[in-house]
Amino acid sequence: MGKRVGMEVSIAAAEAVKQCNVDVVSAYPITPQTHIVEHLSELVANGELDAEFFCVESEHSALSVCVGAAATGARAFTCTSSQGLALMSEITYIASGLRLPMLMIISNRTLSAPLSIWNDHSDAMSIRDCGWIQFFVENGQEVYDHVFVAYRLAEDRKVLFPVIINMDGFILSHVIEPIELIEQEKIDQFLPPYQPLHRLHPDRPVTMGAFALPSIFAEAKKAEEEALRSSMPKLLEVLEAFGDMTGRYYHLIETYKAEDADTLIVTMGSCGETASVAVDKMREEGRSAGLVKIRLWRPFPFEAFKNVTLRAKQLVVIDRAISAGACGPVASEVKAALYGEAQRPSVYNFVAGISGRDVTPRDFIRMVDKAEIEIEEGNKEGFEIYGVRE
Amino acid sequence: MTKPESEWTWKELPIGNVVLEPGNASQYRTGDWKTLKPVLNKELCIHCGLCYIFCPDMAYSLKEEGYFIADLFYCKGCGICAKECPTGAITMVLEEEEK
């Protein structure tokens, strides 16, 4: 078993990136992501990590450098938050369209306006459709672990997609947690050096990012979409292999006391831990409540999600962002997943904890109370922003 | 490309749509974009080569008799050569009106 140490989660993330022996780190500072690249810059400066560290002039350039580096066959890393991610968004679509493996950690933070530095998922949702494999993790150990999973997955010839790990800003990034570190020898076995399928090299010239006319664009997108969807078996295989190495087996959809529950809370990210405390309290009171946590956001694991939710009476879906003019993005995915089923639970949607407002176990219980009453009264598909002062 | 892009199926495309064959842009007919094509009046031509220098698609090349001639497989019909020609030897003519 690896050494268990107390460590700020951002530092643990940077240590994991170092253990993956990346070739290129390119990033622009933005709260609350900064500690990750600050630490990586130290590791490079100290000679502990043999990588090129690029101080770029913007996030647009940060991701562009990663695209260029990955195109030459380098293992590349970047991370960002909020406005920085918004500035990168153009390049996110290019990285996936070119099928270039790389890792980006997003320390999730609210998009302005109003200007805010605190945590929610509005930044991640702004690039939801960019074609990357997207994870949401729950605690520091998961952040650390998913770095290895991400590179192994991204670089697999059957996958070849860039990967995003979403970790909640401050709630995870700035908190000291016990992290079980994995021995370097194990990592070296788990993650072999990157062998690119195609790369920019004068000995064998290729063109990447060429123009496509309408006569071929749809074929190109179909190929990309099929590849993303069919990465699912490899995803399961990599998570299984990681579990075999560490004993920590992760699933695309995690459950907690969900098997026999009438009401299921659905969360994504760090608030899953708080929600599990709420579930315990409700269970003590004899209520039939459970929890479902979405780990893999894209490609969305429709089958795995249906398997654990279809027998419930109602889902209380907690979103940490608003799809303006519609509902929470998680709820809309959940509804899409269930729509084809004759027998399906009601879906009640709360937007909660936007811009870092605390969501306590008591808040989760209140949301469940409210949803159960509303559904009982016939409002089966409700949507509301929770806890707003009237 | 070994065949026109309108014949490729999605399964045949290289991962990431990488173009694996260097220099195959030369096989791409940009000539069918044009409506106007340059026609040279050899009597006015002074062989200065400005059409060759200004052509943005490098469609012009020097032929045996010392004239610069546009390869209509590539020429997009932009008319820059006609505009720059110091003696007015090049005129842009609608393709179907050519005699």
Image (cartoon, rainbow, N blue to C red):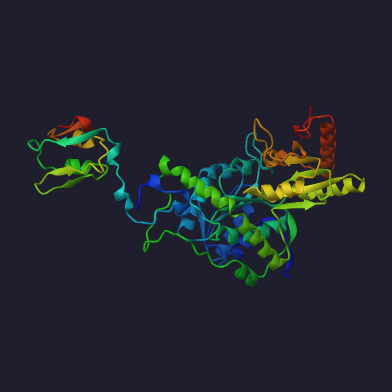
- A275 to A75, vertically: above or below: above
A149 and B97: which is toward the camera: B97
> How far across and down, in percent of the image, does residue A69 sit?
48, 57
**Which of the 4 image quadrants contains residue A211?**
top left
Q: Quadrant of the C terminus of chain A?
A: top right
Residue at 74 percent across and 45 percent down: it is: A267
Residue A267, visible in the rendered structure? yes
Residue A12, visible in the rendered structure? no
Residue at 19 percent across and 34 percent down: it is: B82
Q: Residue furthest bottom?
A: A185
- B21 to B58, vertically: above or below: below
> How many numbered markers are drawn?
0
Q: Quadrant of the N terminus of chain A?
A: bottom right
**Which of the 4 image quadrants contains residue A242?**
bottom right
B23 and A81: which is toward the camera: B23
A105 and A356: which is toward the camera: A105
Q: Residue furthest right?
A: A285
A363 and A222: which is toward the camera: A222
> How far across and down, in percent of the image, does residue A6 sit?
74, 62
Position of A143 with respect to A49 (left or right) is right
Q: Residue furthest left?
A: B43
Residue at 66 percent across and 56 percent down: it is: A10
> How far across and down, in percent of the image, does residue A252 sit?
69, 53
> How far across and down, in percent of the image, does residue B8 sit?
41, 48
Q: Residue furthest front?
A: A342
